[in-house]
Amino acid sequence: MSEGDLIARREGAAGILRLNRPKALNALTLDMTRAIVAALDAFETDPSVAVVILEGAGERGLCAGGDIRGLYESAKVKGDLGKVFWREEYILNARIAKFPKPYVAYMDGFVMGGGVGLAGHASHRIVTEKTRMAMPEVGLGFFPDVGGTWLLSRAAGELGTYYGLTGQTANGPDALAAGMADVLIDSSQWPVLREALTKLAPGSDATAVMTRLKGFSASEQTGPVTAQRMLIDRAFAHDDVEAIVAALKQDGSDFAQATLQAIADKSPRGLKVTLKLLRLARASTSLEQCLSREYLAALEVFDSADFVEGVRAAIIDKDRNPKWQPPTLQGVTPEIVARYLAPRDVALTF
């Protein structure tokens, strides 16, 4: 159907979506988002397409996230790329969750940020021994968006709170334990499984596809983060970031110390906004509610100094020394957090 930054075509019974920017680790652009929408339109109405397969070009991973550089340049000049990109991206995230045909996401290698939005809402989510899944937005003065608050708030125990506030990476077994994936396979089995998916009978339902995937499941394993579940559930159960930090300090274990270090360099306002959104998402009844809330918060992020500074320090200058505003958790008042939840004259239409 098309080539370029997105390859969309039919292979047998499968509609293929291949993110095709391997040098940029398949970072998602606005044009790619629109191309995915057009491809899904075609796949949905094509009776010969039994299943959609999402995959990434190259050897490094599915998708490193959104095109942060483009958003950075737009934010610096008070442009509207964020408003347009996030609107279309979030609407696509919701569509993926409700896509009427089986949608299989192959989450090999790096799957971060916007990549989680394309894969995490799939009906069938495959991870491997090479999966490195993360929502690291708090390190950019942002928060886990693309429906990330919905996914993380429904992770087992407080694993989602941990991943959201630390930006740490989940391997395949950890992603599975957190409910962010459905099947763990060995990556060497993917070509055989992929071929089998292209030969599915027309009209194959979600159960038939899951049965096929389970036939390739690797043996169960416990990931390093899941092994710390008791500590994570205890420390991250609090509803304010300062209390979480205090609980980690009180524990004092090596894992607690490493977690404190992971939190310490994050945006204080990003941390508090993230926790607030996660707790609100936990009480929400739909992905769309969370995406609508995330959109309002994202527009406030785009106007904040922390986003530009976080991207500068992590991606542009790479000095890893962001100057957050305010610089401490204590400086992030309830009034600051409330701005991220304030109504605006915008709305998403799903």
Image (spheres, rainbow, N blue to C red):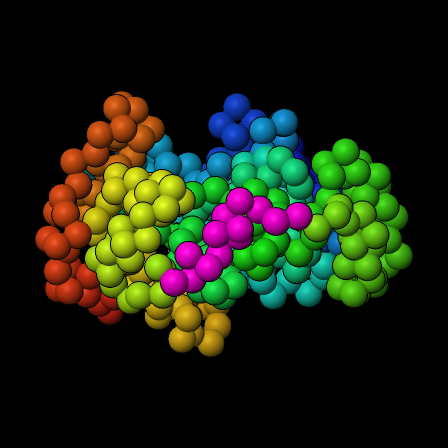
- Whole-percent x, y for residue 257 in the image: 33, 43
In the rendering, at what x and y percent does residue 328 appear?
14, 47
Residue 11 visible in rendering: no
Q: Is residue 65 above or below residue 123?
A: above
Residue 47 x, y percent position in the rendering: 81, 59
At 70% from the left and 50% from the top, the residue drawn is: 220
Instruction: Give whichever of 203, 274 is nearer the camera.
Output: 274
Q: Is residue 207 visible?
A: yes
Residue at the (40%, 44%) spot, across then down: 255
Q: Nearer the viewer, residue 84 or 261?
A: 261
Residue 226 in the magenta stretch? The answer is yes
Between 328 and 55, the residue placed more toward the observer is: 328
In terms of depth relative to the viewer, which is nearer, 80 or 186?
186
Most frequent secondary structure within the magenta stretch: helix
Establish if 41 lies above or below 154: above
Residue 176 among those drawn in magenta: no
Q: How many marks?
A: 0
- The residue drawn where x is 77% and y is 59% is 210
Is residue 254 shown left or right of residue 157? left
Q: Is residue 305 above or below residue 37?
A: above
- Residue 279: name its quadrant: bottom left
The residues colored magenta run 221-234
Return the x and y of residue 141 as percentages of the image width and height: 26, 45
Residue at position x 35%, y 59% from top? 235
The quarter of the rendered structure image containing the N terminus is: top right
